[in-house]
Image (cartoon, helix red, strand yellow):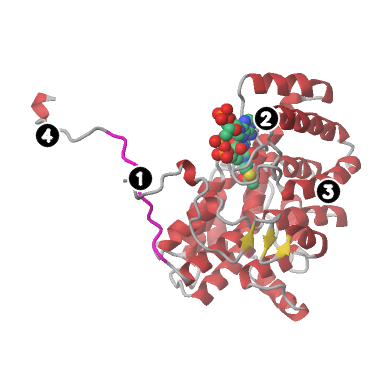
Amino acid sequence: MSELIYSPGLEGVVAGETAISNIADGLRYRGYSIEDLAQHACFEEVAHLILHGDLPTAAQLDAFRGRLGGNAAVDPDLLKLLLAIPAATPLMDVLRTGTSTLAHWDPEATDISHDAQLRKAERLLAKLPTIMAAHYRLRLSEAPVAPDPDLSFAANVLWMIQHKVPSRNLERAMDVSLTLYAEHEFNASTFTSRVITSTMSDLHSAITGAIGALKGPLHGGANERVMAVLEEVGSPDNAEPWIRNALANKVRIMGFGHRVYKTGDPRAVYLKTFCRELAVESGREDLEQMADVIETIVGDEKGLPPNLDWPSARLYHYMGLEVDLYTPLFVLSRVVGWSAHVIEQLDNNRLIRPRSKYVGPGPRAWVPIEQR
Ligand code: ACO
């Protein structure tokens, strides 16, 4: 096996080419820095940029918004089916099933041509918030709230969850978080979607697999666990003893560390400022103080910077959102990046099929069943 390269976890391996995002110099989506996008663009512009390759003109943005609004409703039979899933089911599982099930209602489900995949990606992007919010409201014994095509994507997500048109600040906070979560080159869930696509399977299958990969606590599932950390810490005074004890016991601290960013995740840096503003508004500066203490000690002791999930969990908390929504919100945004990668993979496809390093027993002689 000497000519083969072995890197556990594929660390340091370049597994393909992409023109969608670059993390060599901060994080850029198709050349634009996430800081510029988060500051100036709305999520729909970012989604258009990632899916279609460029920022939209005003007319293109109108048309894109029209398509998203027009596709946001889900077929009543499909909704009925999804609402039959027990109310206590984690929303990530509902989204995984929902994505897979949406294929049965999609007129182009098996068409994997470039243009059909793009249309399906837009339909998925439009419909996933409707599914997530409807199922979330089931557990509150509340009826689903129909999507409002006159609202922005971010405002509509909050509208369907809370049945209240959000304030400008909350809409903006949701919009920025969606922008920052939209795309991140060959992370585990995106790579999953590309592996599935490389067999020439369809978009819904690839996104279903990606959702399965994202929900794990080492990836997107971390943002939900971050809140558990802060709840356990409880107060700023307890932050230092809590984190020192956790580190001494080799506890993995959710929201810290990253396979690629070793000195800092630019998304976390950007969102932290935003987080601060909402903390003041919602009177939860104590959470920011706890977060600061933990951040300083994890940095000093382990050299690990926070990743995006660290501030985003607090941001969603300040927005009055329940923890079980956090990773699903990541899905609503990342479906854009996954879809762009699925399309890019198929446009220049080669089956993704690495090798393994065999570490099992050497050759063994067959033993008949009565002699085992
Ligand atoms: N807390 C404590 N120690 C950590 C952490 C952490 N969050 N992350 C890494 N380490 C330590 C490991 O224990 C290990 O130490 P050791 O060598 O003494 O055993 C060392 O750093 C290397 O850890 P690996 O898991 O091999 O590093 P890798 O680069 O593979 O890890 C990962 C990246 C999985 C993200 C890791 O940092 C982690 O588990 N973080 C917590 C989960 C998390 O926040 N995930 C979100 C990722 S970002 C995103 O999906 C948006």
Q: Quadrant of ligand 1?
A: top right
Residue 181: % across, % down: 68, 53
Under mark 3, the amino acid is Phe
Residue 36: % across, % down: 79, 62
Quick one: label 4, few (<14), some, or many (20+) residues within 10 Å? Answer: few
Q: Is residue 35 visible?
A: yes
In depth, the one of 363 and 205 nearer the eye is 363
Under mark 4, the amino acid is Trp
Residue 354 belongs to magenta span? yes
Q: Nearer the viewer, mark 4 or mark 2?
A: 2
Residue on which the image places disc 3: 274
First-in-chain label (3 vs 1): 3
Residue 334's tag is: none
| Span of residues in magenta | 350-360
Q: Is residue 277 left or right of residue 158?
A: right
Under mark 1, the amino acid is Ser
Quick one: label 2, few (<14), some, or many (20+) residues within 10 Å? Answer: few
Residue 356's tag is: 1
